[in-house]
Amino acid sequence: MKLTLSLMGIFLIFTVIGCKSKSVDTEVQVDQTKPNIIFIYADDLGYGDIGAYGGIGIKTPNMDALANNGLLFTHGYASSATCTPSRYALLTGTYPWRNSNAKILPGTAPLLIDTAQNTIPKMLKSVGYRTGIVGKWHLGLGTGMVDWNTHITPGPNEVGFEYSYIMAATQDRVPTVYIRNGEVVDLDSSDPIVVDYDKNFEGEPTGKDNPEMLKMKWHHGHNNSIVNGIPRIGFMKGGASAKWKDEDMADDFLNEAKAYIGQSGDQPFFLYYAMQQPHVPRTPHPRFVGSSGLGPRGDVIVEADWCIGALMAYLEEMNLLENTLIFLSSDNGPVLNDGYYDDAVELTGNHKPAGPLRGGKYSLFEAGTRVPFITYWKGTIQPGKSDAMVSQIDLFASLAALVGSNTSGPDSQNLLDVLLGKSPKGREDLILEASTRTAYRKGDWAMIPPYRGPEKNNEVNIELGNSTEYQLYNLNDDIGQQKNLASTLPEILNGLIADFEKIRGTEYSNIQKLELK
């Protein structure tokens, strides 16, 4: 079906688009059955960090506009309470606990996704899409012995992305360089890069030994190589001309995303726009410093919101919005102090990053995985709210249905009608993960199996959800998970355990079952 598009405007975060134009005045012929697709994926953004979800203290007008003009899901989930597993599940449609290596990776980890594995970009590429990623990768590169001074493979380009402009892991990990299609950007061959996560290089300063060189102090786990006055995880030497400037990162990724869109011509495209905010180190551009009043964490959320608005303005300028499906989400829940002293705790005020939820990043409680989740498609999705349970893991099967592909991931469900607002019926159940521990959500119930370990991560001041007893919560009545009903509702608990074990198997707890009887 052919359609003529006209100018329009709105804001976006997790996008799925389907047409192209070269100027505001140009009319474009597009295939409505193959919309362009853009995922805008925030990093550590909490359920309560967005105004549309009831957040206070941080202004997010562009995210709010996307939510208010699209479909806001109150029960939208990442697959894991940490980043790498969620990103793995998002792209492959596979529960991360099925892959024992799907955990937070160092910058030198080998590629986590098997090059023979089905992925969203592979699927879309097979039906005529141009595919690209801009931003955070953190799914490993190479085979574990990366030479950063030569072509780096395998990586995003080998799992379905035709174009990639990424950082290898996270902003707080080395190597602190951008990589375009397997090549380190602006690398000087006379100053080669070497990286090691076990030992430092002779003569290289570290955050632990050279505090006088720091512009940001480390709190825990971030005391190795110093880049731009910020101590990192891991050791790096060389590559001076290629190192990024932290304060420019948001602009760098935004400009790359816009350039990718602008070069797509008449071919439908998929863009995975993986933002780095509000992950540590929080380094807002000077024009955003002080914009939130809540310190660097609030400032980078304001910066991220601005980037989304700028991207939306560009899409409007290019006449690309009307055939666009948009998703906004985050890889896991929020954390305040995650390794640096940046006043996130001291300045949070009345703002509650997790909203009404319990826990946060790293936690099996709801705030670990229940995150902002918004879909938008101008003229197709009617504004509103949905209480349907949906997961990022379902985007694979849903998008496959949208574009007419039979390819999908093993755990992904086709919820296209739910995502488009045509059906209120989402998932019946979902397994959630936090650092290899798993829990179960079915209907109104959340069940957390017993795990031996600390109840709280004292470094980040977040409850992990560990207990030597089963936990059972009715989320309809108790969204904050304050009343454990496991001992008072044994029939419901046993039924949930049985359903959980049909999917997960019986080897999931570090406590022997006989101890629980």
Image: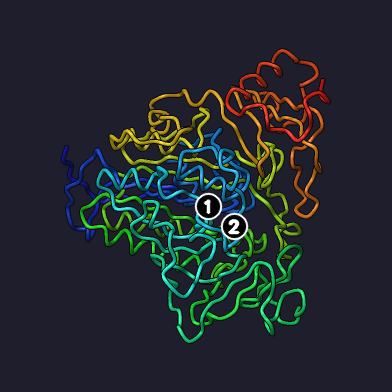
Colour scheme:
rainbow
Please tell me which residue is depicted at 46% across the width and 35% down the height of the picture: 394
Of 303 and 118, the residue lying toward us: 118
Q: Residues within 10 Å of mark 2 (few under 14, many from 20)?
A: many
Horizontal arrangement in the rendering, residue 103 relative to residue 258 (left or right): right
Residues at circles 2 and 1 in contact by the CB criterion of under 8 Å: yes
Q: Position of residue 258 (x, y in %)?
A: 35, 62
Task: Tell me which corner region of the image, top left, top right, bottom left or bottom right, holds residue 430.
Answer: top right
Q: Secondary structure at mark 1?
A: strand
Horizontal arrangement in the rendering, residue 61 relative to residue 437 (left or right): left
492 versus 422 height, above or below: above
Of 389 and 166, the residue lying toward us: 166
- The residue beneath circle 1 is 42
- The residue beneath circle 2 is 278
Q: Position of residue 487 (x, y in %)?
A: 80, 19
Of 422 and 25, the residue lying toward us: 422
Residue ranking furthest to the top: 491
Which amino acid is tagged 2? Pro
Task: Give the position of the N terminus as an image quadrant.
Answer: top left
Please tell me which residue is depicted at 22% across the width and 60% down the height of the picture: 22
The circle drawn on residue 304 is: none
Q: Position of residue 195 (x, y in %)?
A: 59, 72
Please tell me which residue is depicted at 53% across the width and 77% down the height of the picture: 193
159 versus 394 height, above or below: below
Task: Tell me which corner region of the image, top left, top right, bottom left or bottom right, holds residue 511.
Answer: top right
Which amino acid is tagged 1? Ala
Of 127 and 200, the residue lying toward us: 200
408 versus 301 height, above or below: above
Comes first in the chain, label 2 or label 1:
1
